[in-house]
Image (tube, rainbow, N blue to C red):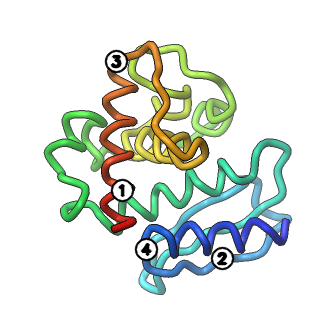
């Protein structure tokens, strides 16, 4: 578990992102990772989990990446075209939590969780690209276009 905060800091530094507060595990909160954007600045809560903690951390960094670079290296018009309306209300309830662990089954989405909201779609694509270290080729052209777009944004952030 102590490696995850170091991993998060390294990725944030690599992508020239503003620093985040990384909070230790909280036994009273059920989500594994969560990113907050409050007046104090972005925060990533670190939790123990049974699935790949690196990929979950990358997902949350994806939210931070998006919030940092939207309107600069991430063009709003392309985001709207590929991912949809980011100002939609965020989902809540059982589906939003459970769907994170299931593979996608609707064309254009890399996971079922990506289907819950355009921001989650972006974060899931970001996590996949960063986890693999390069854009992979999927049989779904929509996913491939999203992956290529996010990969280009990551390369711009790296400088």
Tell me how far mark 4 sits from mark 1, CA to CA: 13 Å
Q: Are marks 4 and 1 in contact (CB under 8 Å)?
A: no
Tell me how far mark 4 sits from mark 3, CA to CA: 29 Å
Residue sitting at 44 percent across and 79 percent down? 18
Q: Are marks 3 and 1 in contact (CB under 8 Å)?
A: no
- N-terminal of the pair, mark 4 or mark 2, is 4
Q: Quadrant of residue 65?
A: bottom left
Q: What numbered label is drawn on residue 22?
A: 2
Residue sitting at 58 percent across and 37 percent down? 96
Q: What residue does disc 4 label?
A: 17
What is the count of numbered marks?
Answer: 4
Q: What residue does disc 1 label?
A: 155
Q: In the figure, 57 relative to 20: above or below?
A: above
Mark 2 element type: strand
Pick the front one: 138 or 27: 138
Q: What numbered label is drawn on residue 81?
A: none
Tell me how far mark 3 sits from mark 1, CA to CA: 21 Å
Percent position of residue 158, x then y: 39, 65
Q: Quadrant of residue 29?
A: bottom right
Tell me how far mark 2 sits from mark 1, CA to CA: 25 Å
Mark 4 element type: loop
27 relative position to 121: left or right: right
- N-terminal of the pair, mark 4 or mark 1, is 4
- N-terminal of the pair, mark 3 or mark 2, is 2
Q: What residue does disc 3 label?
A: 141
- N-terminal of the pair, mark 2 or mark 1, is 2
């Amino acid at each position: 578990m102590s490696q995850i905060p170091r991993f998060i800091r390294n990725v944030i530094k690599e992508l020239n992102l503003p620093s985040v507060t990384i909070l230790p595990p909280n036994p009273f909160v059920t989500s594994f990772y969560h990113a907050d954007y409050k007046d104090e600045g972005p925060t990533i809560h670190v939790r123990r989990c049974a699935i790949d903690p690196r990929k979950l951390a990358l997902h949350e960094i994806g939210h931070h990446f998006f919030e940092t670079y939207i309107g600069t290296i991430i063009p709003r018009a392309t985001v709207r075209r590929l991912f949809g309306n980011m100002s939609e209300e965020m989902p809540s309830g059982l589906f939003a939590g459970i769907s994170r662990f299931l593979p996608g089954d609707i064309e254009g989405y890399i996971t079922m969780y990506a289907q819950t909201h355009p921001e989650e779609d972006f974060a899931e694509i970001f996590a996949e690209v960063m986890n693999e270290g390069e854009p992979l080729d999927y049989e779904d052209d929509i996913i491939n276009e999203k992956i290529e777009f996010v990969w280009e944004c990551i390369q711009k952030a790296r400088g």
